Every structure is written in C-alpha cells, then in structure tokens.
Image (cartoon, coloured by chain):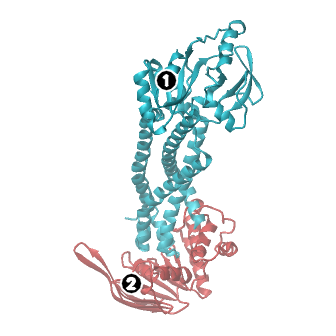
Chain colours: A cyan, B red
Amino acid sequence: MIRLIGKNIAYRPVRNGALFVCFAFIAASIFLGHVLMAGATGSIHQELSRLGADLVVVPAQYTSESEDVLLRGEPSTFFFDRSVLDEVSNVSGVAQAAPQSYFGTNPDNHDSPLVQIIAFDPDRDFTITPWLSEHQQKPLGHGEVILGSGLAGDIGSTNYYYGQPYVVAGRLEPTGTGVDYSVFIREDDARMMAHLSEFYAEEMFALPDNDISVVLVKVQDPSQAALVAERITEQVPGVKVLTPQSLVSTVATQLDATVKLLDLAALVAILVSLPLIAIISLMAANERMREIGILRALGATKKRIFSLILGESLVLALAGGITGVLASLGGLLLSEQYIASSLGIPLALPATGELATLALTTIIVTTAIGVAAAVIPALHAARTEPYLAMRSGEL
Amino acid sequence: MIEVSGLVKTYPAGRKEFRLFDGLSFSSEKGEFVLITGRSGSGKTTLLNILGGLTRPTAGSVKINGREINQMDDDESSAFRSKTIGFVFQFPGLLSALSALENVTLPQSLAGHPANADAARALLDRVGLSGKEDASPAYLSGGELKRVAIARALVNQPALILADEPTADLDVETEREIMELFAGIHAAGTTIVMVTHNPDLAAYASRVLRMERGGLTEKTP
C-alpha cells in the first residue's frame, strides 16, 4: 500500500507538485507567524530582565531614540544634564537610581559599522555589576569592557576603541535586542577614552562632563512602579519615563500589524487552500476512477481505497509541511537580523525546544489539513460501485 | 462452480425502469470454457460483472463455488474476488504508475500475500513477455497489455477467470495468440467465462451461450 502511494505520487509530478507547494506554503505561513511572535516576545522579556530596572528615565525629546537603542540596538547619542540623576533619586518610592551614557560611535575607522557604547557608574550600577557577580566574574575593572553577543572579541582578548586597548572581561548572552551590539564600559574609562581620543583617534569622541543619557530606576515596591513613574514625570521636567509595560507596548504596537498580517496570510492560505486541495483531490479521484474500479476488481476493499486516497494526501501534506517549516526556518536563520530591522522589532529565535514544538505543531496542523481535505474524495472513491467506477469516463 | 437463478437487473430509465434481466438462470461446471456471445447492449458485460461481484443484481441468486456472493459484505467479497476470480477487461486495465511486473504482483499484495516476483516473472514468461518486466504500460502494445492483464489474472491461481471482450481491438494474429493463451489456461483446469461479440472465438470454448432479450440460449460450439 505504501509503495503504491509512493508510485502514484511520483507518477503525477505536476499535480502532486502543486499540492506539495500548497502545503509547504501553508506550513511556512503558520510557522513564520508563530516563530516571529514567540521570538519578539521572548526577546523583550530577555531585554527587560537584562536591564534589571523597573523604570528607565530618558530625555523627553529623545524618547524615540531611547526606544531605538533599547529595543533595536540602533546606535544613538543623546544626553540630559546629570542633575536629573539627583532629582530622580529624591522622588518618593525610588530605591536606587543609576546613570548610563549612550554613544553611538565609530571607534575604529569610518568604514566599520557603528557600535553602541554604554558607560555606567560601577558605584551606583545595579544591572551590569550583579550580572557579573551572577556569572562568577569580578567587578569590571579599568581598561575592561563587556561585549554584547553580536560583537567580535573573545574573553581575555584586546579590543581597541579610539586607539586605546581594552580587555574583553565578559560577553553577554544573545537577547535579540540592542544589548547584543553594545560595549559596556566604566564611566570613568569612557571619559578617559574621550580625552585620549583627542590625541590617538582620527576623529575626536566628545563626552560632555556633566551629561548622562538615561537613569535606570529600581523602585521600592514594584507594584507601585506606575505611580513612581507618574511622580518622576511630574517632578522632573524634560524627562520621559519608560516602563517595561511601555516598552512591551511599543513593540506590541510595531509587531501587531505584522502578526496580524502573518495570521491573515496563514488564515487565507488555509481558507483558500483547503477547498482547493479538496477540489484537486476530488478531481484526481474522479480522473482515477477507472483505476480505482480495477483495484476493487482485483480485491481492494473500500477501506483500502479510502486509505490509498487519504494516504496520498497525507504523504504530500507531511512532506510539504516539513519542507515549509525547514525552508522558513532556514530563511529565518539566514536573515534574522534583516527581518528584525525590516519589521522594526527585536528578534531572538526561540530556544530549540520551543522551536521544535512550534515546528512539530505546524507539521501536525498541515498534515491534518491535508487529510481533512482528502476525506470527501476518498469516501467518494471508496463508495463508488466497482462496475460504475470502471465505466467512468466512457460516457 | 457457477449457479445463477432468477437473476433480475433493472436500471432507471427516466420515470420508468429498464429491465435488462428478468429471471435469468444458468449454471456452469468446474473446468468449463463458457463463451457468451450476443449483440452490443444485450447485457453480456453486466452479467460478467454480476458474476464477479462488481455490481449487484436487483434480485436473484449468484453462487460461485457454492457461496452466495451477493450476501457477502465488502471485506468478504473483496477477499473472495482476490482469491477466487481473475479478471481480464476489455480495456487494458493496468495501473499506469506500475511496471508490468508490479501490475502482475498487485493482486498478491491486495490478497494480503507478500509479492512473489519469481511467480510473476514466470507468468510473464508464459504469456511471452520475458524481458519486459520493468516496462511501463505506456510503452507496451495493445497485445502486450492484454498479455500482462492475463498474467495478472492468473497470479493468485483463481478457480475462475472472467474475461470481457479480451480480443477487442486486436489484430487477427494477436487475437489468435491471446486465445491460445486462454485455451492453455482452460486446459490446465481453470474455469473461464468469456463474453464477446465475435462468434469466431467459439472454436476455443467448450460451451457457447447466446444472450438475447435478457436470456441465455445454448448453442453448439
């Protein structure tokens, strides 16, 4: 029976090839939509967990740039006055406040891509230092940097920024966000780098003494984070407070249209393909009615005919499903960054286990669609009297 | 071997009913070569299909080897067909996706037996198709297709062969070769019921019946 299914599929390459492509398209639409959704959501959660802050205070006029740095890793430079740090620290409900300074810069030469340098104050920091401690590493020393996963440099090796050597003390895991393309450095080292760039670098790196880019805030009671954010906005002029919710909401808004589009594509693919596959299968069964009559005359039961038609559709749907999943996965792996930047979302592919579950679910759904579409043609073929089946096409 | 009694077969014809057989009866002994002749539309092929369980009569009894085939369920009648009856159709009736050899072994698989390629090769050799085992039906001549169909009909060693106009559309020489094959099968003890509109084939049969006006009349071979 399995051999006959294989022979029948191979004998009609054009029609079965079209069905195969149809199933592959359905599988790719379903799989891509869900992987992008899972990838973007997972990425945001990783980013927020890495950030370790309940609130991020940014210059109001640079809100969009701040979100770009945090979510998409688009290097950017923006500042507000350091006095904001003290003002934020004094707001009721704030437990800790730590400054960070962001520089979107080209530290080597004009041809290399921009990197985001993030300078932090080790004395007040509560995001990078705990991470180092968690990974059994000593606090970041002078002349040391921590690299995001997307940047080159092994631990212990030396990278040069503005002509100055810095030892790579650590590397962060991939997050699919801006963190992956950031260089973390002590604030005093960053100021020294700026000072020395005047003598050693082709282009000078300016870092105003009294400016910082953002203030990361840890609140005393996380359930009151929204209230504290409101207080900061009221009491500190010229700032905007980004909350994890607002960041998720920003991404969700950006992703919403894409996810809806992918869902719609999958739905349309299923709605259009299901009757199409059913009609093609019915036409194929009718076209092969004489062959089915012969099989019945030679001893094939109705059940066997039913299984034969259903089996052919199942094999095509299964093969199409697997191919669609593998092709879309390959496409995602090859163009992950391009897709993320095109859609304007952070994107990290889900973990292998989650990816395998999504792939398996997609293949099962696609195969079920193939089997469902073939039920009526298979019943029709099995129920037709052998004599009438053999006379099919004569009249 | 074959006992048909009170066979009625009707077809709807608009609001009326067309009665093809109205109480047809006949019987055949084991090992006979029965040739049924008659004009087109007389019901020869329908009778053959009723004997093979491929269509059900409106009323009447059809017994093959003592078993009432019209009271069998689908599983039983399919198993009975695959083990007891071999069919040779007017049209080639081969599966295009399979080779000549695979077409011959197909009834073995459908009967639930492992495909015996050696037996199938021997049958193809017997019908004069040695060396064409792997050929696709698309590349075989009309006579060769008929020979493959005869080999396929014999592969499960059935007690009864039902042949529907097996020499239609064949030239005289090929017709003679095919009929010689049937004569050999008959000589080996297999019962054959063949329908044809060609009265010249009567020479090969042990018994000739003519179908007219829904009934069968005996003729001397």
Q: Is residue B44 above or below residue A15?
A: below
* Three-letter code, disc 1: Val
For residue A391, which quarter of the picture?
A: bottom left
Identified at 47% across, 62% down, the residue is A288
Identified at 73% across, 27% down, the residue is A168
- Left-right relation of B43 to B169: left
Which secondary structure lies at badge 1? Answer: helix
Q: Position of residue B31 (x, y in %)?
A: 56, 90
Q: Is residue A328 above or below residue B26?
A: above
- Name the chain letter of the residue that bears numbered label 1: A
Instruction: Check chain identity for marks 2 and 1: say if they share one.
Output: no
What residue would you read off at disc 1?
A: A88
* Three-letter code, disc 2: Met
Q: Position of residue B95 (x, y in %)?
A: 54, 65
Spatial distance from mark 2 to mark 1, Cα to Cα? 108 Å
What residue would you read off at disc 2?
A: B211
Task: Judge whether residue A135 can be spotted in this image.
Answer: yes
Q: Nearer the viewer, residue A386 or A56?
A: A56
Q: Residue furthest top?
A: A199
| Quarter that holds the N terminus of chain A | bottom right
Residue count near mark 2 (Cα–Cα under 10 Å), binned few <14, some 14–19, many ≥20: many
Identified at 41% across, 79% down, the residue is B44
Q: State yes or no: discs 2 and 1 in contact (Cβ < 8 Å).
A: no
Identified at 66% across, 65% down, the residue is B132
For residue A329, which quarter of the picture?
A: top right
Q: Is residue A363 above or below residue A206?
A: below
Q: Nearer the viewer, residue A104 or A85?
A: A85
Q: Position of residue A227 (x, y in %)?
A: 41, 33
Q: Position of residue B134 (x, y in %)?
A: 66, 63
| Quarter that holds the C terminus of chain A | bottom left
